[in-house]
Image (cartoon, rainbow, N blue to C red):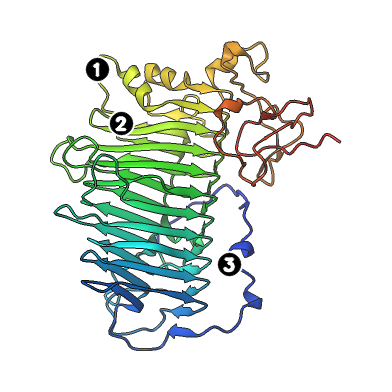
């Protein structure tokens, strides 16, 4: 596929050093190599296949996989794992390198570099960690689940500390993708237990469209999964996309998602997109739910919005339960966007407030100048309803801050919302850490904190202003106490 063009971006600096994830290239040994200048007939360099009566599994480590010049292969990938007919597969894939383009022989999108599918089966007790993965023309890591006739297909999988990128000449649809459809799960039973932690997704020249895609379709549920400490930077599309598309009845497809201490930086689209997609319906009568909490994340420098919410309606709900201690900064189109609303005509504000619970301890600054209070897509009444859920935050152009005696000093009458320059360490170097002069230090709400750590793994609640009282800061960074 041809690579989309990527406009210039605000230069946010990655907070996680590259070498800590992929190791020092000069110190690595000459590992055994699979592929490269060879002919093949299989669709993977390593295939683990758990089928009727036969389980499959293994440990794969310290190998180099090369997709260059492999011929006679319709969809060459480094690793393919399948679990079918009630069987279970298990794999540990760690400290490997998947190099060079993995291109379908026909030139169309084939399989991802690492392809895993549970079809009436399960992939459990599995790990993909500490690898350097160059994406195929389709993507980096793809997890597929499908079942039928009461069968359940699922995952028990950890994806951690991988560096996912593209070759100079490549373009891919995604870095990591999970897609569940018709999994036989009902009443909110999770279809997958997947932890995605500590990964760096950073393509060459915008060669990955969306960093991470989580897609739930008919009878599939994503819940109790971890998504923490990932950096998604420089994609031509969006950082994270959550899509829930039920078909038949209430609770037909559902995502419960906790994003904690992640970075969504400098992407060509938006940082995070939550969407109910009725594409597969003849009418808008399907059901899809997304329950979303984001805490201590940095969403900055994206050419779209910080967050996009699409498809709020009677039979669907993109539910942002909370945004807490997030820093939403310098996103070109705005901080938040709402679209495809299908609210009732009698009490739309009340319906919207059933979806939006609260924004607390956030810094929302420098986002798109054309929208009201950095929010797009809402009428005046709906905008006021959303802004009324904001507390203990530094929010540019927020009307509540104007009620305070001093817009830089939180007051009860303004719901402790301020509108004041956050005063970061370096505006020029785009360093999001709070300087000692920041008005955001020690003025948050401790009751709004879930996690124990900030984005840098510092303790979340400290005495940053040295007044002998530990109070959380606003934003993703907690300024360390230095009261000697």
Q: Which of marks 2 and 1 is nearer the N terminus?
A: 2
The location of residue 282, given as percent across then percent down, is 13, 41
Judge depth for marks 3 and 1 and give the one in front: 3
Label 3 SS: helix
The vertical placement of 208 against 227, above or below, is below
Q: Nearer the viewer, mark 2 or mark 3?
A: 3
Circle 1 sits in a helix, a strand or a loop, which is it?
loop
Numbered circle sitting on residue 312: 2
Q: Where is residue 90 in the image (x, y as percent from the top left)?
A: 37, 68
Q: Distance between the residues labelled 2 and 3?
A: 40 Å
**Mark 2 or mark 3: whose residue is earlier in sequence:** 3
Residue 271 drawn at (x, y percent): 47, 44
Quadrant position of residue 55: bottom left
**Residue under numbered circle 3:** 22
Residue at (45% x, 78% y) in the render: 65
The quadrant in which residue 74 appears is bottom left
Residue beneath disc 1: 345
Q: How crowded is the residue under tag 2: few (<14 C-alpha within 10 Å), some, or many (20+)?
A: many
Disc 3 packing (10 Å; few <14; some 14–19; many ≥20): many
**First of labels 3, 1 by sequence position:** 3
Quick one: 99 or 179, which is closer to the camera?
A: 179
Question: Position of 467 compared to 93: left or right?
Answer: right
């Amino acid at each position: 596929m041809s690579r989309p063009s990527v406009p210039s971006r605000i230069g946010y600096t990655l907070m996680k050093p590259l070498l800590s994830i992929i190791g020092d290239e000069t110190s690595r040994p000459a590992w055994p190599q699979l592929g490269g200048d060879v002919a093949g007939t299989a669709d993977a360099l390593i295939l683990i296949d758990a089928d009727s009566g036969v389980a499959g599994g293994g440990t794969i480590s310290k190998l180099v996989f090369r997709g260059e010049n492999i011929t006679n292969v319709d969809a060459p990938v480094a690793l393919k794992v399948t679990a079918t007919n009630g069987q279970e597969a298990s794999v540990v894939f760690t400290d490997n390198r998947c190099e060079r383009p993995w291109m379908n022989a026909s030139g169309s999108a084939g399989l991802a570099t690492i392809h895993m599918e549970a079809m009436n089966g399960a992939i459990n007790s599995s790990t993909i960690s500490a690898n350097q993965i160059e994406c195929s023309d389709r993507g980096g890591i793809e997890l597929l689940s499908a079942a039928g006739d009461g069968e359940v297909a699922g995952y028990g999988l950890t994806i951690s500390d991988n560096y996912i990128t593209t070759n100079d000449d490549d373009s891919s649809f995604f870095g990591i993708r999970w897609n569940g459809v018709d999994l036989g799960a009902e009443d909110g039973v999770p279809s997958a237990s997947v932890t995605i932690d500590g990964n760096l997704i950073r393509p060459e020249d915008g060669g990955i469209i969306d960093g991470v895609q989580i897609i739930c379709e008919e009878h599939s549920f994503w819940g109790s999964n971890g998504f923490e400490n990932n950096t998604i930077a420089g994609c031509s599309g969006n950082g994270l996309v959550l899509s829930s598309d039920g078909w038949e009845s209430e609770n037909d497809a559902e995502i419960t998602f906790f994003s904690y201490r992640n970075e969504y930086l400098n992407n060509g689209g938006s940082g995070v997109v939550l969407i109910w997609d009725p594409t597969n319906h003849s009418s808008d009568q399907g059901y899809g739910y997304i329950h979303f909490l984001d805490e201590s994340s940095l969403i900055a420098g994206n050419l779209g919005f910080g967050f996009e919410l699409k498809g709020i309606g009677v039979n669907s709900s993109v539910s942002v339960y909370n945004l807490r201690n997030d820093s939403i900064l310098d996103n070109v189109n705005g901080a938040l966007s709402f679209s495809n609303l299908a609210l009732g005509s009698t009490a739309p504000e009340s319906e919207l407030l059933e979806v939006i619970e609260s924004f607390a301890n956030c810094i929302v600054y420098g986002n798109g100048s054309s929208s009201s209070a950095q929010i797009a897509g809402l009428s005046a009444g709906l905008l006021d309803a959303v802004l009324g859920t904001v507390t203990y935050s530094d929010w540019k152009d927020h009307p509540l801050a104007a009620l305070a005696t001093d817009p830089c000093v939180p007051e009860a009458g303004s719901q402790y919302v301020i509108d004041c320059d956050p005063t970061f360490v370096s505006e020029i170097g785009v360093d999001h850490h709070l300087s000692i002069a920041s008005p955001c230090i020690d003025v948050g709400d401790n009751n709004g904190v879930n996690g124990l750590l900030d984005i840098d793994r510092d303790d979340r609640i400290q005495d940053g202003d040295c007044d002998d009282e530990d109070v959380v800061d606003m934003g993703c960074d907690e300024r360390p106490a230095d009261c000697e």
